[in-house]
Amino acid sequence: LEGGRLVDRCGGGLCRVLAWGYWLARRLTGTTSMAVQSAQLLAEGDLMTRLRPTGDPGVDGLIGLYNRMVDALRDERRRIEEQHFLLSRILEVSPSGIATFDFDGRIDYANKAAERLFGLPAAYLQGRRPAEAPGSLAASLARLEPGQARVIPIEGARRVRCHMGTFMDRGFSRSFVVLEELTEALREVEKAAYEKLIRMLSHEVNNTVAASTSLLSSCLNYAPQIGGEDRDDFETALKVVIERSTQLNVFMRGFAEVVRLPPPRREECDLAHVARGVGRLAHPLGADKWVEWRWEIPEGVAPVRVDRSQLEQVLLNVLKNAIEAVPANGVVTVSVGQDGATPWLAVQDNGPGVPDVVREHLFTPFFSTKPGGQGIGLTLVQEILRQHDLPFALDSAPGGPTRFVIRFPPLPRPTPELA
């Protein structure tokens, strides 16, 4: 009997152990299944699915913790996506050019303003280092170090401020560059400064020269009262001073012409006709150097609407510079063409080119490398083209050639009349 009771007790204990083991196994299996499922959801980036409670307090505690974590991650991801969308919209409409570089120094992003300043589409820039892209801006960026800022000249008259900085991405440093065009701002400041200076100098010099010349001319009337060799010396001295005063007046008048430039009186004209006419005027200027003139003027180039006399003045100044730049037996090429609906006019010479140091200051008001030069020519060219709102570019490098291009907006097409 006692043996039977012992067996019963052992059997009951074994059943309890088996039941407890079964309960523990189910709990562990449920916990493991929940852990596997949650890990799979996280691996797939699924932050929308929430786990349902199982009725087990221990497992439900873990499920609640998981659901709260997923909700927090989902809210954070939404916030980051919204910030990223806002930042991308701001970058796209920003007037400043912005480009970022990957860990190898290659461009991986460029906004629309950067595309415009580089003159290249973002698809072309992406994956390239600045040194591998064409253009003076890209070449200058290749020499820019993080933390540096420089004003870089591009296309002759344009100025771009470039700042290279760094930011952290996944614990590593990356570079970015901000490009800001300063052309118009600098031009307005320079123009206001030199206009004020020229007006003041013109007023003082012209008034002084006019009064002095009048007095000196009156003094010449007393020359007959001086006898012998003294009279000749007296007349010669006064005439020299009068001549120099007249030349000073002419000198100041050249500067004043830039300030008093009238607004353009636009009319429709033929670029080919203008180019040939100014070329005939400039032809004798290159006779001493035996300059070879080449003309690339096809038929059918669309007419443009400009102030013809001012455009002729621009072209004459550019041709003079080209003639001065070429060596003996040099070549000056005058071209007229059309890209799509956009007409253009170009002057190219095979001179030694413009050094980098000079190119940075080429369109600075009254800058000149010529002995005794006033720097009026290119200043006047720039002012006339700015008043016409005509884009222009000067492409040159040491060794040449040098090419100056003016582009003209297409004329509006006439609206057909309805019957």
Image (spheres, helix red, strand yellow):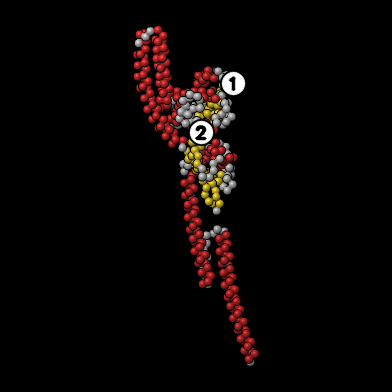
Residue depicted at x 49% and y 61%:
71
- Quadrant assignment, res 121: top right
Residue nearest the observer in this picture, 205 or 66? 205
Residue nearest the observer in this picture, 375 or 56? 375
Say few, some or many: other residues with alpha carbon within 10 Å of mark 2 (under 14 / 14 to 19 / 20 or more).
some
Q: Amino acid at mark 2?
A: Glu
Q: Which residue is mark 1?
A: 329
Residue 131 in percent (x, y) is at 58, 40
Q: CA distance from mark 2 to mark 1?
A: 28 Å
Say few, some or many: other residues with alpha carbon within 10 Å of mark 1 (under 14 / 14 to 19 / 20 or more).
some
The answer to whether residue 325 is above or below residue 134 is above
Q: Which residue is mark 2?
A: 360
Q: Report the quarter where the C terminus lies.
A: top left
- Whichever of callouts 2 and 1 sits on the residue coming sooner in the sequence is 1
Residue 348 in percent (x, y) is at 55, 26
Q: Nearer the viewer, mark 2 or mark 1?
A: 2
Callout 1 secondary element:
loop
* Residue 419, visible in the rendered structure: no
Q: Amino acid at mark 1?
A: Asn
Residue nearest the observer in this picture, 349 or 328? 328
Residue depicted at x 42% and y 31%:
191
Residue depicted at x 57% and y 48%:
103
Q: Report the quarter where the N terminus lies.
A: bottom right
Callout 2 secondary element:
loop
* Residue 118, visible in the rendered structure: yes
Residue 414 falls left or right of residue 134: left
